[in-house]
Image (spheres, helix red, strand yellow):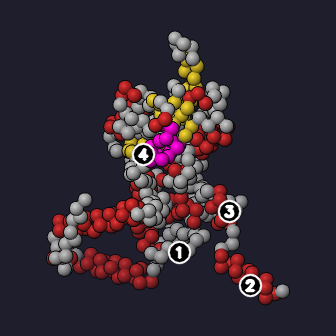
Amino acid sequence: MKLPALNTAIKDLSEVDRREFFKAGGAVATVALTSGVTLMAFGGEASAKADAGKRWGLLIDVNKCKSDCNACVTACSDENGWEDTGNPETDAQWIRKVDLTHKQTGREVSLPMMCQHCEDAPCIDVCPTGASFKRADGIVLVDKHACIGCRYCMMACPFKARSFVHEPIENQKTHAPRGNGTVESCTLCVHRVDKGGQPACVEACGKTGNGAMMFGDLNDPASEIAVALKQYSSIGLRDDLRLNPGVRYNNL
Amino acid sequence: MKRLFASFLILIGLMGMASAGEIKSSLAPVVPKAAGEAHPEGNEFMRINHMKLMVHDRDDTVLLGDRNVKYSLKECVACHAVMGPDARPVSVKSDQHFCRTCHEFAAVKIDCFQCHNSLPDADLVKKLTMLPQKDRELAAYLKEVTE
């Protein structure tokens, strides 16, 4: 990438017109950004921001997921401070268990469903305010500061992974703010991921001994998840829509 | 016209006095003290600019994933927690809450706590209720001297 040269002709700011001033500012910002990238490339201090080189994802082995187990859902509920009130029409839908039966063969499977963190997410396409967005590392989120609660994204999502908060909420978790009049969904436990951790559901699934869920960087060929994806067949849900979800399923 | 001009002069004079002697309205809020160290920018700066700093850093956190921001609501709430009669931090429901004391006086409605918790994290409360570093040193010194 060619760096724009710093404008050394600028002597006195009062002589510079507005346009020149912003051009100069842009050049400085680019240099600072590039030095940060260079640092990372040489294995220096890790960037504090979401890494554009990564794509976080999940691999769920449906054969290991037990129909009577709900550990991932309760873990998510505890972690993010939402709870079922017994009204499925209005309840939060961060994660839920889905049982499927193949009509011809009768094979029964159970799997967790949550935001699939699509590469080409329909929720982002339809959002009128830009509140639905994808972070540099592939996590799809709702910026509730910009969300006006129109719920277009809920309509657009083929996985019914989003829900609307219908009533005022109190005593939220400080790491998972959520409030009346906004749409919410699985955040892939972004607060944990930013600290180098893994989502609460994956951790809980591992603790039950089932180990059906795997979390990792899909872009890193050496990561456990990438190795598993290379070795075994897996599908993204509704692959016909070409959304390239970050959540993939084995043995479905 | 002369009378109007005179009253105008008096008004200007009064305003000058107010700024010189810092005559405050009797309704001016008593701002509760924070637990941590003072902002290096100074209280006056923070009173005028805190919302800009917070909006800037909230966008960095939410959109870019930067968790090492300087101004986060979580830390504001923790450091500025006001303890109620039960020695627990009060929520925004109480008019003792730090944010409310000023915002009610200024008649500025804030939406932060529709989504964010107005109470600090439990582990932060523990830290807050502990003696500050200097006080602990002083206590240790006093113990040493009196023994």
Please give the label number shown on residue B141. Answer: 2
**Chain of residue at mark 2:** B
User: Of the residues tagged 3 and 1, which is closer to the observer?
Assistant: 3
Mark 2 and mark 1: span between their CA atoms? 25 Å
Q: Which of the pair B78/A190 is nearer the observer?
A: A190
A190 within the magenta span: no
Secondary structure found at label 3: helix
Residue at position x 49%, y 32% in the image: A232
Q: Position of residue A42 (x, y in %)?
A: 40, 63
Residue at position x 43%, y 57% in the image: A49
Look at label 3 and name its amino acid. Answer: Lys
Mark 3 and mark 4: span between their CA atoms? 40 Å
The residue most toward the top is A104
The stretch in magenta equals A215-229
Q: Position of residue B113 (x, y in %)?
A: 51, 52
Look at label 4 and name its amino acid. Answer: Asn
Q: Reading the chain from its start, which is encountered first: label 2 or label 1?
A: 1
Please name the residue that numbered disc 1 is placed on: B38
Mark 4 and mark 1: span between their CA atoms? 44 Å
Please name the residue that numbered disc 4 is placed on: A219
Please name the residue that numbered disc 3 is placed on: B126
Mark 3 and mark 2: span between their CA atoms? 23 Å
A226 within the magenta span: yes
Q: Position of residue B11 (x, y in %)?
A: 34, 77
**Chain of residue at mark 3:** B
Look at label 2 and name its amino acid. Answer: Tyr
**Chain of residue at mark 1:** B
Both on one chain, marks 3 and 4? Answer: no
